[in-house]
Amino acid sequence: MRQGFNLNSLPFLFTSLLFISVALFAFLKNKKSRVNRSFFLFGLAASLWQFPYFIAYNLTNDVYILLWIKIAYIGWSFLTTTCYNFIASFLNLNKKNFIRIFYLISFVFLYFLFRTDYLVAGIRKFSWGNCVSVGNYYSVFLIIWLTPSLLALEYLYYEYKQAESPYNKKRIKYFLFTLPIAFLALIDLLPNYGVNIYPLGFIPLMLFGIAITYAIIRYRLLDIEIIIKKVSLIALGFAVLTSILYAASFYLQPYFSALIGKNWIILPILLSLLAGIIMLRFINFVRQIEEDELSKKFAYRPLLKKEAERISVAKNINELVAYLVRDLSSWVRLDYVGIFIFDAQTKRFFLARSIVRTKGREKLAPDLSITLHNPLVEQLIKVKKPIIRSEIEYYLNTQSASNGATGFLARVVKAMETLGTEISIPSFCEGELLAIINIGHKLNANEIITAEDLEIFTSLSNNIARAVYGFMLNKEKIRLIVASQNTIISAMEAKDTYTRGHSERVANYTFLIGRELQKQLRNFSYDLNNLKWSAQLHDVGKISIPDSILFKPGPLTEEEMAKMREHPVNGMKIISPVKEWLGEDICAGVLGHHENFDGTGYPFKQKGEEIHIFARIIRVADSFDAMTTKRLYRPTFTRKEALAELNDYKDTAFDPVIVEILEKLYNANELE
């Protein structure tokens, strides 16, 4: 009943083993996934189509040959139906009715296969093996059989056009371009019509199987354009060339023998040499891919170097994130970047800086904050790695049943949508989440954020976390220093009912002005806490002024005024031991809060932009509070009158921009 082993049957064995092993792997990887289950059915059908041919090619009894070929047609009958089921699941389409109909048609095929000769009328024998002799309605069955696959291809194309996320677009595009490869396997049907050509359909089937396997296993990767890494690519190249040589050696032997006689073996040898040359070129091609990948990483070196320099010289968190947001947006060409920084006192993450580079995208409120109980924050703390919204959406779309975990992930997606982010990257230091980098898409819709990009972002996030941690420690030191100085200032102000609470009021005014200025100026990179602390300390130098001058109920003499004008310099002397911790900004605000915009102030007669922005803000806030505080030797101004006075002296004593901002806050009833 059996003949010598037929080498022509080996491709069917290899193909069937490939599909069944991959199908089982995907199924066992995640049995609950609707996509994996449908892919398992597809792989099972493909394996059942190929394996019986391996047996049939090694049989001589026509009855058994026909039986095994009909068994192969069981897999063939369900192949396109399971393919449709798989694509519908992958795209998360509700096509249950169509799936049922196509499965029903597949079972109808089985009826005609085993009870009639409409589909299979007999067998055909060729020198290389056996195939079916088609029945009268085989072509009709073939058209019906192809319909599910063509519909699946249409769905892929439509969803590709409709997809907004570049990541989902890439995933769909991957399947859209690999599915037609499988259609090339239809060449196996030609011998059924009497065409004497060995069925080489196993080659596109194996290519499709390898490609689809990679997509199923690695669908979460963002760099799926590079199909397989170096070793896998070379292995795939060898597999393809081996298949070609195998076909040349065994399937084309009759043609070679007829052409050059007994020396036909020369042609396969020449083909082998040609294949070797092709393989060398292919290896060089793979190396080029590897070099391109490396060049992408090296291309970020200037960015990493620049950010390392930024971190080392940044005076505060705001300055750091201002440069980081701008650099990331321009270097990687992102449509959105936003950085949230954790505030230990309020236990919230505040939006430190964001940038939007597309017109249709809504900007986030500059004072936006999220709590530790925000689903996104909880997930970042849990997984401690970047979170990709499209990944979670894909996972949720392919789950057959909802549960507590999927419900929580749905809230994570909602939180990311609210923040307008596609990828959230956590910044951890000492086990604490200190910052969150939120990014959108690339400006070029055809480009996606790759794994290399994510590596760079993660590296930067770690550096940022360390910098933020350092700033937070320094911030706590400053808070303690200011608190201790405020105790002295409060004790001093308590002696005079007219100046009581002056420093605190000035601090509140400066904070409100600074916050409004931050909204108006894109490059305002100063820390508002530092501004407020500088305002709280602005009169610390008055500790050294005699009470007789400080609390004199009337106007001061020239000598007394000269003594009073020493308090900014005295203030600097008092805080100089902790100057390193306080920083230049706070010290500049204390030293220069009596400089006039036209250069007539003291102690250094600085002018215009030469005066530190903290000092200019405190100058306006200090004068406003002084005028609106009751004094014995002069009438008290109303807030409206005080603003009129400030406007009269803007461009001379006061920065006109700061005066305008204070007036805006007054008109909006935002002055506390």
Image (cartoon, rainbow, N blue to C red):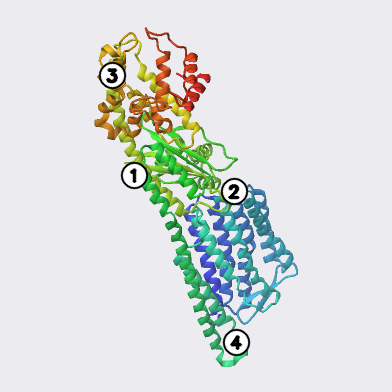
At horizontal 26% and vertical 17% (from top left) the residue drawn is 545
Residue 161: x and y, percent? 64, 51
Going by the numbered disc 2, the residue's amino acid type is Asn
Q: What element carries label 2?
A: loop
Crowd class of label 2 (few under 14; some 14 to 19; many from 20; radius 10 Å): some
Is residue 299 depicted above or below 468 in this figure? below
User: In the rendered structure, are the residues bearing label 4 and label 1 in contact, judged by CB atoms less than 8 Å apart?
Assistant: no
Q: Is residue 525 left or right of residue 393?
A: left
User: Which residue occupies the foreground of this view, 590 or 437?
Assistant: 590
Q: Position of residue 347 (x, y in %)?
A: 38, 31
Of mark 1 and mark 2, the one earlier in the sequence is 2
Residue occupied by mark 2: 92
- Mark 3 vs mark 1, foreground winner is 3
> Callout 1 environment at 10 Å: few (<14), some (14 to 19), or many (20+)?
few
Residue 563's label in the rendered image is: 3
Disc 1 marks which residue?
312
Amino acid found under the numbered disc labelled 4: Phe
The residue that label 4 is drawn on is 256
